[in-house]
Each structure stands twice: as C-alpha cells, then as structure tokens.
Image (cartoon, helix red, strand yellow):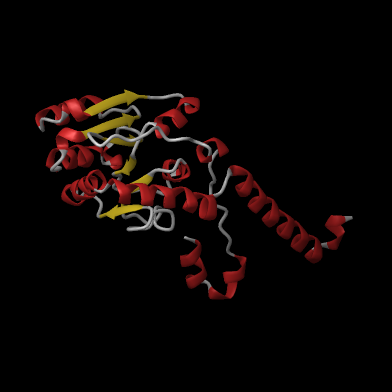
C-alpha cells in the first residue's frame, strides 16, 4: 500500500511510511519439536469462513500423493465448521484433519512448535499476523500468493507461494514439503531469519510509531510555534 501511494503521489513520497506489525518475542524463541519422516505436521489458523479457504486445503490434501502421511491441525472456529468436517469426510481425508477449535493465545506457541509447515489457504488477506508468527517460529510457510503475504514469504526461499483457490498447486507444495525434508528444513531456517530481518517484534513496531510521532510533532511545532509554547 505504501509503495502504491508513493507511486500515485510522487510529490509526497517522502511523507508515506509503513509501520508493520511485529510478533511477540516468544515466537522467536520457540524450539521446534523434532520432525518425523512418516508424517508431515501441517498447521493452519483462522476463522472457519469461506474467505480463509479451508475448503481448498481439504481439497489439496485429498489430491496429495502423500495424503496418508498428512496430519493437519486447524486452529479456529466459525460457521463453516460442520461443513468443512463433512467436506473432509466426503473426500476421504477426515482422519487427516484435527479441527482444534479456538485455542488460547498463550497456547499458540506450542502449536507452532509441534508443526513442520504452516499453510495459509486464504482467498484474500491484509497482512496476516499469523504468517509473521509462523515465520518467527521457524516454520516454512505455504501460502496463497497475496499482496499482504509478499515481502514476508518468498517462494523458494522461506516457503511456497501458490495461486489462490488452486488446490492442485497447494497439493504439489505439500508433497514437495513432505518429500524433501532437507529443503523444508532449509526454508524453515530461512523463515526465522526473515522474521528477524523484516518483521521484528512489537517493540520494533512501537519504535517505528514513536519515531513518526516525533517527526509529526516536530513538524507541527515548526509550522505553528504558538502551539508549542
């Protein structure tokens, strides 16, 4: 959004800033549980609504060559819960899914710790905090290719980007993550490095806002000296 605004209003480009959401430091300190070769532990988080594309994830798992080795934990609740369970059952993959419901915030680090890869199957997003948390946790991310995700997830570096709504592409990414564990480990290591370099913590976010507020207050004082007295 900042890039587009600078392009649209080049005369004000220097006035456009973006303070991005950070993550709780706990995610950067997560120690991942050892992976096993016989199952790919997949974590997905979000409200169970059409926008989040969990139906696409179910379809993708059903089309995976390694569907019997997929273990998908879905954290979240919503109106599509029953429909998604029925869909998983109709596709023969109900046993591969654990719909965990709502999970307390303080329990989420443990969920990230117990996963091998994070999946975001959304049809649309802003800049999803859960992707930032997954990267900070050292999880490679398989995500739909959305504006808000680009810049956090780089295809081939710290994850996979697939077209929104494309179950075949998502299935292929899941298969790739299962088949090449060394590559998955490499992308996972890159994930945490990305989080430290590009995302940071909430304290970093606060410092960004503080710096902008100081500039704004100083600029206002220069234009209206009587207000500063």
Residue at 41% across / 24% down in the picture? 103
Q: Quadrant of residue 119?
A: top left
Give coordinates of residue 38: x percent, y percent: 22, 34
Is 178 rendered above or below residue 105? Answer: below
Q: What is the quadrant of residue 14 in the picture?
A: bottom right
Residue at image point 53% right, 47% down? 21
Which quarter of the image is occupied by the C terminus?
bottom right
Nearer to the camera, 133 or 190: 190
**Residue 48 pos. (x, y %):** 30, 32
Residue 34 shown left or right of residue 217 in the figure: left
Choose between 154 and 188: the one closer to the eye: 188
Q: Residue at x 18, y 25 (%)?
A: 95
Check the image and name the residue furthest to the right.
229
> Where residue 154 appears, x then y in whole percent?
38, 58
Query: Visible in this render: residue 16?
Result: yes
Q: Give percent across and percent down for residue 56.
A: 21, 42
Q: Name the residue located 53 percent from the left edge and 37 percent from the top edge.
A: 29
Q: Among all residues in the image, which is located at the extreme bottom? A: 11
């Amino acid at each position: 959004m900042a890039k587009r605004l600078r392009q649209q209003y080049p005369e004000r480009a220097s006035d456009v800033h973006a303070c991005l959401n950070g993550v709780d430091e706990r995610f950067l300190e997560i120690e991942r549980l050892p992976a096993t070769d016989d199952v790919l532990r997949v974590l997905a988080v979000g409200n169970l609504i059409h926008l989040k594309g969990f139906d696409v994830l179910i379809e993708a798992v059903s089309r995976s060559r390694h569907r019997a080795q997929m273990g998908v934990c879905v954290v979240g609740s919503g109106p599509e819960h029953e429909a998604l369970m029925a869909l998983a059952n109709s596709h023969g993959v109900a046993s591969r899914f654990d719909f965990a419901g709502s999970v307390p915030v303080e329990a989420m680090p443990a969920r990230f710790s117990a996963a091998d890869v994070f999946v975001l199957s959304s049809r649309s997003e802003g800049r999803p905090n859960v992707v930032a948390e997954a990267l900070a946790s050292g999880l490679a991310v398989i995500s739909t290719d959305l504006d808000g995700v680009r810049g956090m997830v780089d295809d081939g570096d710290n994850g996979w980007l697939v077209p929104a709504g494309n179950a075949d592409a998502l299935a292929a990414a899941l298969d790739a993550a299962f088949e090449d564990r060394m590559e998955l480990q490499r992308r996972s290591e890159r994930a945490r490095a990305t989080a430290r370099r590009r995302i940071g913590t909430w304290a970093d976010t606060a410092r960004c806002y503080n710096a902008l507020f100081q500039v704004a207050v100083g600029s206002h004082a220069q234009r209206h000296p009587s207000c500063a007295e």
